[in-house]
Image (cartoon, rainbow, N blue to C red):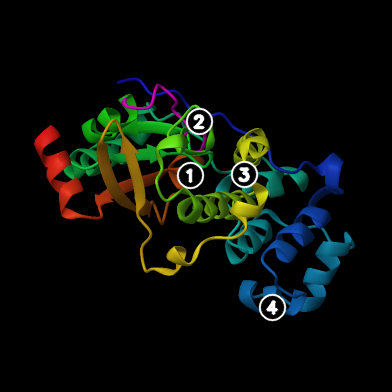
Amino acid sequence: MTTPAITRTEGPHADQHGGFPALLRTWRNKRRLSQLDLALSAGVSQRHLSFLESGRAQPSRSMILQLGEALEVPLRDRNDLLSAAGFAPVFRARPLDDPQMSQIMNAVRMMLANHDPFPAAAIDRAWNIRMANKAFEMMLAMFGAERNLMRLVFHPDGVRPYIRNWAAAAPLMWARARREAETLEGEDMKAVLRELEPYQDADLLFAAEEAALVPVLPLEIEKDGMRISLFTVIATFGTAQDVTAEELRIESFFPADEATEQLFRAAI
């Protein structure tokens, strides 16, 4: 199976935001850290950090990487920090079919296959479905050919009309997508959210029902008399040094009741 490369979506640029000093301030504010907090976390003096943010001092390549680690900046955006300061990007974004990605992709395939007969998929930071197991493809076939998980759920032509607990599940899923887009500076996900926003009830998305307070909220789907109830677990590569690998998520669906478990076991 040949999988398309994840296209690089540029983060904030130097000419738009005032270069490295502004980018550094943006990430510090995003993480809600004072200059002192960041200085202590990164092992630098607050005075030097102040000079970096004001442009009175120029950062070294190692200092940028040090600050990026302390701020938990995604690898894609650490490249933008480096570029804004005049350095070449360090972290590559390899296609999923690149030979150097073979170990990672073998691990992903193994995780997906081992999760059958229950659905699982590998998604990128915009929630595009990059790989899926048999159970997920079977479930996907019920609702069309959409390969983006957000569009699949939130577009009226997708699974949305069949979600029985929409008022409880939709606000939490939307909030997760917004949170990831902000945390990861995900311009591609932000574009998906803007696309889908006109179809949404704004009041509902910001007012989850009390059912959302249970430990794990299932996604309850009913179509053509068939009912399934699933909840998800997300896995990531915690020590990735490649942009593509860092942005991959393994979304594993588990049955939330015995009837759903038996349904999938009988189907695969």
Label 2 crowd bin: few (<14), some (14–19), many (20+), radius 10 Å: some
In this rendering, the answer to whether 3 lies above or below 27 is above
Can residue 194 be seen? no
Of the numbered discs 3 and 1, the one sitting upstream in the chain is 3
- Which callout, 4 or 3, points at the residue further toward the start of the chain? 4
- Give yes or no for contact between labels 2 and 4 (Cβ–Cβ under 8 Å): no
In the image, what residue type sits under mark 1?
A: Glu
Q: Is residue 29 left or right of residue 172?
A: right
Q: Compute the Cα span from label 2 to label 3.
A: 13 Å
Q: Are marks 1 and 2 in contact (CB under 8 Å)?
A: yes
Which mark identifies residue 247? Answer: 1
What is the spatial separation of the Cα atoms under label 2 and label 4, in whole angstroms? 34 Å
Residue 128 seen by the camera = yes
Q: Which mark is residue 37?
A: 4
Residue 56 position within the rendered picture, expressed as x and y whole percent measured from the top left: 90, 62
Q: Which residue is mark 2?
A: 6
Q: Does residue 206 appear to the left or right of 219 in the view shown?
A: right
Is the C-beta separation of discs 4 and 1 under 8 Å? Answer: no
Residue for badge 3: 186
Q: If the image is split into quadrants, where does the N terminus sit?
A: top left
Magenta span includes 93: no
Q: Residue furthest front?
A: 225
Q: Nearer the viewer, mark 2 or mark 3?
A: 3
> Looking at the picture, which amino acid does disc 4 mark?
Asp
